[in-house]
Amino acid sequence: MSILFTPINLGNVQIKNRFIHSATYEVMSLETGEVSDKFVKRYQNLAKGEVGLIIPGYMFVHPLGRSYKYQTGIHSDDMIPGLRKVVEAVHQEGGKIAFQLAHAGRQTTKAMIGQTPIGPSSKGRDPINFVKPKEMSADQIQEVIQAFGVAAKRAVEAGVDGIQLHAAHCYLINQFISPFFNHRKDEWGGSDANRFRLLKEVISEVRNKLPQGMPILVKLNTHDYTPRGCRIWR
């Protein structure tokens, strides 16, 4: 058990112990996506409780990538002051913090984003919201890749210690990876390499916006529990 209390390095960032708060949807931000005082206090308390690395709940990188009400946004420069407060509060208590970046893809609703949700393919309805999505164009895919990069830049401006990419739980990156959701026949689908291309390009774009040595983490599941039992690797 003693190893749990020893430091560990992630890139050039030292975490004081092995305790990590995994990202969860807090439902604590404002309707605009800005963090609330309660949000800041939550993570300050976790850092005060000696959690070495804190990853707040998934932050949407693009207006069309918002999943739920009161989800934290990192889609606009207007979010930076509030995000900086969170980082400063965690640092004040001796903790480290990484922001989790996400895009809902098809796993949202028209009521939430103002239009039909988008995804890698239009086939079928989303298992969560029962929405039939629109297939993304090549330009829309590039727009999303760039949105992840700009969001990472905002995180750096807020003083963050690392970035985590949400590539699990049927959100957009996971949708591209999964053969259950991705039925494309172009460079973004068909083969394992093509389905992983979006994640690869997002990692590259994000890395270009980060200081050298800042860690990039990826949240990735290995089984989607879809009706056909599709596995990511077959």
Image (cartoon, rainbow, N blue to C red):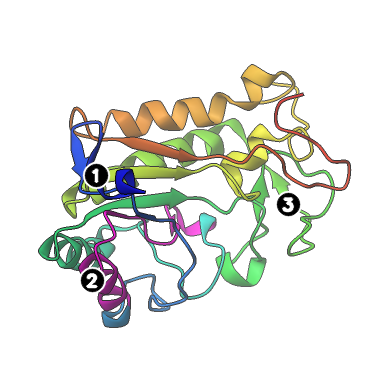
Q: Horizontally, is 124 left or right of 53 in the view?
A: right
Task: Pinpoint residue 214: horizontal percent, then vertical percent.
Answer: 23, 35
User: Taking 122 as reference, is 58 above or below it?
Assistant: below
Q: Earlier in the sequence, mark 1 or mark 2?
A: 1
Q: Is disc 1 surrounded by few (<14), some (14 to 19) or many (20+) residues within 10 Å?
A: few
Q: Earlier in the sequence, mark 1 or mark 3?
A: 1
**Residue type (three-letter) at the residue carrying disc 2:** Gln
**Is residue 222 located in the magenta-colored stretch of the structure?**
no
Residue 129 figure quarter: bottom right
In front of the other: label 2 or label 3? 2
Pick whichever, 16 or 10, lies toward us.
Answer: 16
- Which residue is disc 2 drawn over? 44
Task: Pinpoint residue 232: horizontal percent, then vertical percent.
Answer: 70, 32
In front of the other: label 1 or label 3? 1
In front of the other: label 1 or label 2? 1
Residue span colored magenta: 39-64
Which residue is drawn at the image coordinates 38% and 62% (left, top)? 73
Residue extending furthest toward the left = 92
- Which residue is disc 3 drawn over? 133
Residue extending furthest toward the bottom = 38
Which residue is drawn at the image coordinates 52% and 74% (left, top)? 69
User: Taking 128 as reference, is 219 above or below it?
Assistant: above
Pick whichever, 120 or 223, lies toward us.
Answer: 223
Q: Secondary structure at mark 3?
A: loop
Q: Secondary structure at mark 2?
A: helix
**Residue type (three-letter) at the residue carrying disc 3:** Pro
Give the number of the disc on residue 114: none
- Which residue is disc 1 drawn over? 6
